[in-house]
Image: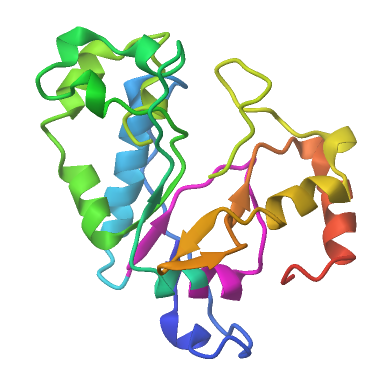
């Protein structure tokens, strides 16, 4: 996705030309396998061809924005950091998936668990596409049930229900309390300042959630 920076110079300005769509060649990918990371790297490589692209966000069809385009764009462009979810999980879904054959390039102390969704700046995107040091190790030794896309490129998701996937929110889950929980989280730091805005996107939402989502968003002032 490419944004026209001039169109969003003033947050109060109407977006005249917010998005130019970029298409990447088709690539067959399988969940949990290296082909998923291959597809992500190809998306990044294709987007990097446009020198005006500065920030890169990976989302899926089950993700929703929590704020409008102007707010998300401003938040990201003002930040000096990239955002990749990664944490050191000592349990079976974290270090339990580590294969010692990945050393010395990937040590268990460096092993991280997270979702593959990310927001990165151009410098980091280039590094992700160019990597030839760690890629071979993940390709050879991170096999099911390792789920390479959860570790190679470690959004806020609810993992509390267990399993290899985060919870999927359907029609019955879409209540105002869910979004209050997201918007009222106050554990984040942004530009060295405490902020209550911790998440720009949320997932996973099933197609059945669309109607109640639109209903709730139309009644709240979260920037839409």
- 188 with respect to 220 (left or right): left
**Residue 146 in sight from this viewpoint:** yes
The quarter of the picture where residue 26 lies is: top left
State the image coordinates of residue 17 (x, y, percent, origin top left). Answer: 53, 80
Q: Quadrant of the C terminus?
A: bottom right
Q: Name the residue at 33% across, 57% down.
A: 47
Q: Is residue 37 magenta?
A: no
Q: Name the residue at 40% across, 37% down.
A: 86
Q: Nearer the viewer, residue 96 or 49?
A: 96
State the image coordinates of residue 78 (x, y, percent, origin top left). Answer: 42, 75
Q: Compared to 41, does 99 lie above or below?
A: above
- 185 with respect to 110 (left or right): right
Q: Compared to 191, does 203 lie above or below?
A: above
Q: Is residue 61 magenta?
A: yes
Q: Nearer the viewer, residue 165 or 180?
A: 180
Q: Name the residue at 30% across, 41% down.
A: 41
The quarter of the picture where residue 25 lies is: top left
Q: Nearer the viewer, residue 178 or 35?
A: 178
Range of residues picked out in magenta: 53-74
**Residue 28 in sight from this viewpoint:** no
């Amino acid at each position: 996705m490419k944004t026209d920076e001039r169109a969003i110079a003033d947050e109060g300005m109407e977006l005249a030309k917010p998005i130019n769509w970029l298409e990447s060649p088709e690539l067959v990918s399988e969940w949990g396998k290296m082909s998923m990371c291959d597809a992500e790297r190809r998306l990044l490589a294709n987007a990097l061809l446009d020198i005006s692209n500065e920030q890169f966000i990976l989302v899926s069809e089950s993700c929703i924005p929590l704020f409008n385009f102007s707010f998300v764009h401003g938040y990201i462009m003002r930040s000096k950091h990239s955002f990749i979810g990664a944490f050191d999980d000592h349990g079976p879904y974290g270090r339990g998936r580590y294969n010692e054959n990945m050393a010395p390039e990937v040590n268990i102390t460096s092993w991280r668990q997270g979702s593959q969704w990310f927001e990165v700046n151009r410098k980091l995107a280039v590094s992700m596409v160019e990597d030839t040091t760690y890629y071979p190790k993940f390709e050879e030794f991170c096999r099911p049930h390792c789920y390479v896309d959860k570790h190679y490129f470690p959004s806020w998701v609810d993992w509390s229900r267990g399993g290899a996937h985060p919870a999927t929110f359907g029609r019955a889950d879409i209540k105002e309390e869910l979004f209050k929980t997201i918007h009222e989280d106050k554990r984040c730091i942004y530009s060295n300042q405490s902020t209550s805005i911790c998440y720009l996107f949320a997932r996973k939402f099933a197609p059945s959630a669309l109607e109640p989502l639109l209903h709730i968003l139309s009644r709240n002032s979260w920037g839409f």
